[in-house]
Image (spheres, coloured by chain):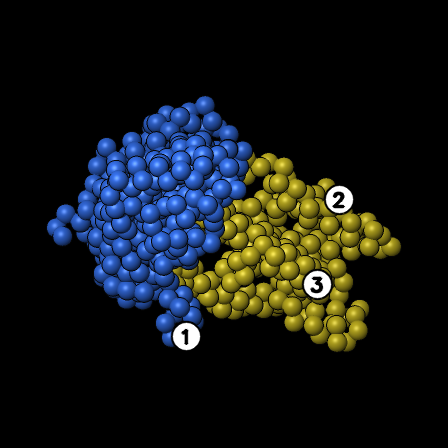
Chain colours: A blue, B yellow
């Protein structure tokens, strides 16, 4: 693809070197293409290989094999050229905790060879843009989690990179911090930056990403837009919330699908089942519940969530049912 | 990219200096600690022999060498902290000169060591210690001490890259003490049991202390010992400098 910002073909990586047989590979022939100016979500559980992928793309880690290009340059042979064009937001804040926010940004600006004056100006700009102006003097270790993350993000944008890597950018943040980071990422995309985002949160991928690759055991097991992935899992679902959790067992039998296709969430008194004919199913369920004297608080038709897609694709469907 | 080697190294050095500005108490404690040791050994341990005169002339070079040896700890802690915080990842993903992270670290640590030596020498002078070897001897002694510190620095960087974990740092911190004390810093090896005296004489730090004593024109110095105080640190550097550089490059494995 000519307009690809990231090309990964058959990437392989086993930690501890390929000479020693040291367990299963972190990347096992992973393929990925990200079009310029888009946000690509890489979704997967812990240990799927997401961080390994980001570290290889950001030139921090050497792949054992594969063709890997970022912004048109090979990550191994042209690491320096890649570094000129990328920004990285790792899982842990990559900041000097002892220094202030402004000092950090100036430091990274100088290391990007902006020169003293431009580094200072850029630091001011970024502090303002991420609403950190008043806190620039404070040592980073005194920042809140959300502030630290925003400063970290600012630090990865010093030179307005062509490609930005965000490795689980909101892990460990409270909902407010998460919203702040999402907001920042959205504002970036307008500027034409290509973003590769890894996450364990399906909601995050759904919210931010144009396309999503689902990764498991070092390979991409599905690829597409959120809608395409949802469609791949199957059609609509019907959700029924009961007034009385004691009646869940009765209600399962009343749904027009085999018993083992029904997902039960006892805490939320919720039943969920796939349906084919939307309206007929809705009418049928309402009638059946009424006839059996089962009181429903809410009944709704909906598309599957990414959670369901994800668990379906990783072969962990059972986990959903067992959670019931 | 090599055109930026100096700029980047200097930026990294300045980063360390900026950190000092943020933690003046830590900086002062680090400078005062060797002074405390000097006073402790001078007055408490060396009490019988008096602080003035002979023993002070013997002790000061030992304390200077010991301070340089203990610098290993500080280097190791700083490198370990950087690695743990992920900030080294940011540096490595940036278009900066390859060696700048390590060069900046060594430059900053050397600046701190020069300050440490200056403070310790000033206190010693206030106690009545004098260098009797003339300006050339004085500069030579300081040079040997800094060379020894430089070797310790790269051992510290290597250990931090190998161990990587804070628990290992405290293990090394504990081990530095016996290594520092199994030297001729406080007492002449002739006054020790044979086996201990032999160990002490082999300690590279002892060579530095002996040569410094010689260059300061004080007791305990051996003429012609300077070469050992040059060769030992260089030998250590020949081993640990490439090891540390290789370890750093291998962070990408």
- Disc nearer the start of the sequence (2/3): 2
Q: Which-is-in-front pick, marks 2 and 1?
A: 1
> Which residue was labeled with disc 1?
A20
In the depicted structure, whether residue B18 falls above or below residue A29: above
The chain carrying label 2 is: B
Q: Quadrant of residue B251?
A: bottom left
> Which residue was labeled with disc 3?
B178
> Which residue was labeled with disc 2?
B127
Label 1 crowd bin: few (<14), some (14–19), many (20+), radius 10 Å: few
Residue drawn at x 65%, y 71% is B202
Residue drawn at x 35%, y 37% is A287
Measuring from the top left, give residue B114's x and y in whole percent. Answer: 56, 47
Q: In the orientation shown, which residue stands out farthest toward the top?
A: A134
Q: For numbered disc 1, what is the local secondary structure?
A: loop
Same chain letter for marks 2 and 1: no
Distance (Cα) linking label 2 and label 3? 27 Å
Q: Left or right of A216: which side holds B219?
A: right
Measuring from the top left, give residue A317's x and y in whole percent. Answer: 38, 55
> Which disc is residue A163 wearing?
none
Q: Nearer the viewer, residue A280 or B107?
A: A280
The chain carrying label 1 is: A
């Amino acid at each position: 693809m000519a307009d690809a910002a990231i090309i990964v073909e058959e990437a392989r990586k086993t930690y501890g070197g390929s000479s020693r047989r040291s367990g299963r590979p972190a990347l096992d022939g992973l393929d990925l293409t990200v079009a310029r100016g888009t946000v690509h979500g890489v979704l997967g559980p812990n240990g799927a290989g997401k961080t390994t992928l980001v570290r290889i793309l950001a030139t921090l880690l050497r792949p054992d094999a594969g063709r890997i290009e970022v912004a048109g340059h090979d990550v191994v042979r042209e690491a320096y050229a890649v570094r000129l064009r990328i920004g990285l937001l790792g899982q842990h804040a990559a900041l000097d905790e002892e220094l202030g926010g402004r000092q950090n940004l100036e430091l990274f600006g100088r290391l990007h060879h902006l020169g003293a004056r431009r580094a200072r100006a850029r630091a001011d700009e970024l502090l303002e843009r991420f609403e950190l102006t008043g806190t620039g003097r404070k040592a980073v270790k005194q920042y809140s989690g959300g502030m630290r993350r925003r400063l970290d993000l600012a630090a990865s944008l010093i030179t307005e990179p062509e490609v930005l890597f965000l490795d689980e950018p909101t892990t460990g943040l409270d909902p407010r911090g998460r919203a702040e980071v999402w907001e920042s990422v959205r504002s970036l995309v307008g500027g034409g930056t290509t973003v590769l985002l890894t996450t364990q949160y399906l909601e995050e991928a759904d919210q931010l990403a144009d396309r999503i690759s689902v990764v498991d055991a070092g390979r991409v097991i599905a690829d597409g837009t959120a809608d395409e992935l949802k469609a791949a899992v199957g059609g609509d679902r019907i959700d029924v919330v009961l007034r009385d959790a004691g009646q869940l067992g009765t209600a399962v039998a009343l749904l027009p699908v085999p018993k083992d296709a029904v997902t039960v969430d006892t805490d939320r008194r919720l039943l969920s089942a796939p349906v084919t004919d939307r309206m007929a199913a809705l009418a049928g369920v309402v009638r059946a519940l009424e006839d059996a004297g089962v009181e429903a608080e809410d009944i709704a038709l909906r598309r599957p969530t990414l959670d369901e897609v994800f668990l379906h694709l990783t072969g962990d469907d059972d986990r959903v049912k067992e959670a019931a | 990219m090599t055109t930026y080697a100096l700029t980047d190294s200097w930026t990294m050095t300045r980063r360390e200096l900026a950190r000092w500005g943020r933690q003046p108490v830590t900086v002062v404690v680090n400078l005062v600690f060797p002074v405390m040791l000097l006073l402790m050994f001078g007055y408490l341990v060396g009490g019988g022999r008096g602080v003035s005169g002979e023993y002070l002339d013997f002790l000061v070079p030992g304390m200077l060498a010991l301070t340089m040896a203990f610098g290993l700890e500080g280097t190791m802690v700083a490198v370990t902290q950087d690695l743990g915080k992920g900030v080294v990842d940011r540096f490595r993903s940036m278009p900066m000169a390859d060696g700048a992270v390590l060069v900046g670290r060594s430059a900053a640590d050397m600046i701190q060591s020069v300050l440490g030596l200056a403070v310790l020498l000033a206190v010693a002078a206030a106690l009545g210690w004098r260098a009797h070897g003339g300006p050339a001897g004085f500069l030579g002694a300081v040079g040997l001490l800094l060379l020894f510190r430089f070797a310790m620095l790269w051992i510290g960087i290597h250990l931090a890259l190998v161990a990587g974990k804070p628990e290992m740092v405290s293990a090394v911190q504990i081990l530095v003490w016996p290594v520092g004390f199994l030297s001729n810093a406080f007492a002449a090896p002739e006054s020790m049991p044979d086996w201990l005296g032999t160990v002490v004489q082999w300690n590279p730090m002892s060579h530095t202390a002996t040569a410094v004593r010689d260059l300061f024109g004080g007791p305990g110095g051996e003429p012609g010992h300077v070469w050992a105080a040059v060769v030992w640190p260089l030998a250590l550097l020949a081993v640990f400098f490439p090891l540390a550089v290789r370890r750093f490059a291998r962070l990408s494995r």
